[in-house]
Image: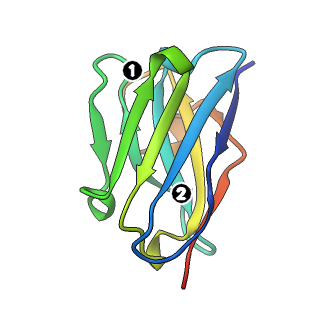
């Protein structure tokens, strides 16, 4: 059983930055495609960034391109989501998820999920 854990959320002012981390126990995130998703109250869960296991290619939803960066540290068994120039529309619970297939925006295609970490952007 793989247990995924996110951390790094918090309260930040508009224009600020946060870095989320994702680790896994029972396995290694190095073996999976990683997706970062977010869900705001009353909204559908949406993918914001993912990194393919096979080639390390990065994918971003248009609303975060140029502001968010997904990266993987193989030595630390950790995937990061660096979020810059945050705005109130980025407020949501952010989830990390893993799958053994290629990168995907479909949450139903991911196998293991973390519990989520709250990101609040407010002045």
Residue at figure coordinates x 43%, y 22% from the top left: 101
Q: Residues within 10 Å of mark 1 (few under 14, many from 20)?
A: many
Asked if the residue under mark 1 is in contact with the one under mark 2, i.e. CB atoms within 8 Å, the reply is: no
Residue at figure coordinates x 65%, y 25% from the top left: 24
- Foreground pick, 66 / 53: 66
Q: What count of labels does the image hold?
A: 2
Q: Which mark, by number, is residue 38?
A: 2
Residue 30 screen position, x and y as percent: 49, 17
Residue 35 screen position, x and y as percent: 47, 39
Query: Is residue 18 found left or right of 57 in the rendered image?
Result: right
Please tell me whether residue 28 is drawn above or below residue 3 in the rendered image: above
Rounded to the nearest whole Å, what is the CA distance between mark 2 and mark 1?
20 Å
Residue 2 screen position, x and y as percent: 70, 22
Q: Residue furthest bottom?
A: 123
Q: Quadrant of residue 5?
A: top right
In what element is the residue under mark 2?
strand
Q: Can you say which quadrant of the picture contains the C terminus?
A: bottom right
Please tell me whether residue 51 is drawn above or below residue 36 in the rendered image: above
Query: Is residue 59 found left or right of 27 in the rendered image?
Result: left
Q: Earlier in the sequence, mark 2 or mark 1?
A: 2
- Foreground pick, 59 / 109: 59
Please tell me whether residue 56 is drawn above or below residue 46 in the rendered image: above
Tell me the residue that label 1 is attached to: 53
């Amino acid at each position: 059983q793989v247990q995924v854990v996110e951390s790094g959320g918090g309260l930040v002012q508009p224009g600020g930055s946060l870095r989320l981390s994702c680790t896994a126990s029972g396995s290694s995130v190095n073996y999976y495609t990683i997706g970062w998703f977010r869900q705001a109250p009353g909204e559908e869960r949406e993918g914001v960034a993912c990194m393919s296991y096979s080639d390390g290619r990065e994918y971003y939803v248009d609303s975060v391109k140029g502001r968010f960066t997904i990266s993987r540290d193989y030595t630390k068994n950790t995937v990061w989501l660096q979020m810059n120039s945050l705005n109130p529309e980025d407020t949501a619970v952010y989830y990390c998820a893993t799958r053994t297939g290629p990168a995907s925006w479909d949450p139903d295609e991911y196998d293991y999920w973390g519990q989520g970490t709250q990101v609040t952007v407010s002045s």
